[in-house]
Amino acid sequence: MQLPDLKALFKKIDENQKAIHKIKENYAGTRTEEETEYDGSGKVKKVETSQFTFFYMDGEEVSTLVQKDGKAAERGRAEKRKRDDKKTDRGIAKARNKKRS
């Protein structure tokens, strides 16, 4: 049994990853996450739902919280929204820095 040419294999993997990243660049969407907390007897204690918008930049996902438990993130959550915006900005900066490297 002959092993594959590793140089050619890694080149093909790299090309495939670049193609995947390019496809992701044209993709954006929304994601809903649900977190359920249970008490000691196994009954539901608390359910939290978060909705995010997301897009990809240089292969990195950049997401922003838009709703928490059915309420818009902007209402009464200005400080949290600022932190989320900073996190989004850091994600964009990270993607740009990665692209330059």
Image (tube, rainbow, N blue to C red):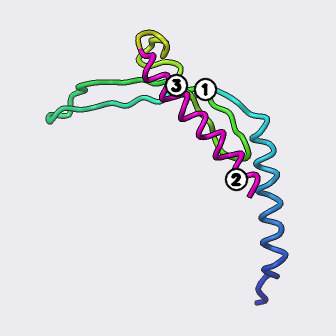
The stretch drawn in magenta includes residue 38: no
Q: Which image quarter holds the N terminus? A: bottom right
First in sequence: mark 3 or mark 1? 1
* Residue picked out by circle 1: 53
Secondary element at image label 1: strand
Q: CA distance from mark 3 to mark 2?
A: 24 Å
* Residue picked out by circle 3: 65
Residue at 54% of width from left, 35% of height from top?
87
What range of the chain is rendered magenta? Answer: 77-101
In-image side of 35 versus 7 (left or right): left
What residue type is disc 1 on? Thr
The stretch drawn in magenta includes residue 92: yes
Q: CA distance from mark 3 to mark 1?
A: 7 Å
Q: Which image quarter holds the C terminus? A: bottom right
- Residue 41 picture quarter: top left
What residue type is disc 3 on? Leu
**How would you classify the magenta stretch by its main secondary structure?**
helix
In the foreground, 19 or 2: 19
Q: Is residue 45 above or below residue 73?
A: below
Q: Which mark is residue 98?
A: 2
Q: Are marks 3 and 1 in contact (CB under 8 Å)?
A: no
Q: How many residues crowd mark 3 within 10 Å: few (<14), some (14–19), many (20+)?
A: many
Residue at 65% of width from left, 42% of height from top?
93
- Residue 12 picture quarter: bottom right
